[in-house]
Image: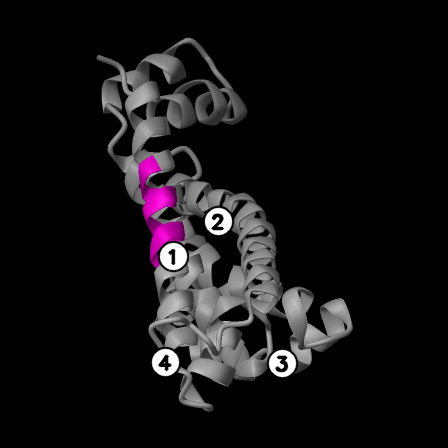
Amino acid sequence: MSSFADVDWADVGQACLDTLAMLGGSFVLTIVFGLMLGIALFLTSPGQVWANRSVNLALSLVVNILRSVPFIILLIVMLPVTVALVGTSLGVAGAIPPLVVGAAPFFARLVETALREVDRNTVEAVQAIGATTRDLVFRALLPEALPGLIAAATVTAIALVSFTAMAGVVGAGGLGDLAIRFGYQRFQTDVMIVTVALLLVLVQLLQMLGDRLVRLVTRR
């Protein structure tokens, strides 16, 4: 184990690429859908421009249901949907739909929270000059909430790393798949150590990048 004799570094390299591909693809889609859902949750809440109790409750119910389902169960439940969407439930492509469905509601709640922290006076000032809802969102809410949104995106990206590892259970590939097939099922402890270490490094890099971006956009 000390020499990592069981580690096939070519497999490790491919697993890293698969994990990054899953993370990148799912992260972009999660940000897009989660941001739209979070904005809708905020705008339809009481006291906002699109205040609608029924719509807000419906959106909240969907978000809460999806957030409450353990990701490993979501992976299995979504197998038919994933096959219908991308033609397979295996590999990187097969992992992305459940990753997005699992992470987007989580990010949406963080977006809603970040928007709620925007100074109410700023919102009222924009509304007072007759701005449209589009202007309110893109010229006031999102710019003012940007540090919080970046922090939320960082947390979501780190959550997606853990999700990609779990996706290895259903043959999605990546470091999680390597850890399960070799580290766990074949008792190759050195493979497990390498995969865990790489996942920890990836999480640390994401956190450092997110923290740096937050500092850059935070108004002093």
Magenta segment, which residues? 200-208
User: Mark 3 or 1 closer to N-term?
Assistant: 3
Residue 118 in the magenta stretch? The answer is: no
The amino acid sitting under disc 3 is Leu
Marks 3 and 1, how far apart at CA: 21 Å
From the image, tell me which residue sits under label 1: 106
* Horizontal arrangement in the rendering, residue 31 relative to residue 195 (left or right): right
Discs 4, 3 touching: Cβ within 8 Å: no
Which of discs 4 and 2 lies nearer the camera? The answer is 4
From the image, tell me which residue sits under label 4: 189
Q: Main secondary structure of the magenta part?
A: helix
User: Mark 4 or 2 closer to N-term?
Assistant: 2
Callout 1: SS:
helix
Which of discs 4 and 3 lies nearer the camera? The answer is 4
Q: Residues within 10 Å of mark 3 (few under 14, many from 20)?
A: some
Looking at this view, is 30 or 41 the one in front? 30
The amino acid sitting under disc 1 is Phe
From the image, tell me which residue sits under label 2: 34
Looking at this view, is 24 or 38 the one in front? 24
The amino acid sitting under disc 2 is Gly
Residue 117: image x %, image y %? 24, 33
Marks 1 and 2, how far apart at CA: 8 Å
Marks 1 and 4, how far apart at CA: 33 Å
Discs 3, 1 touching: Cβ within 8 Å: no
The amino acid sitting under disc 4 is Thr
Marks 3 and 2, how far apart at CA: 22 Å
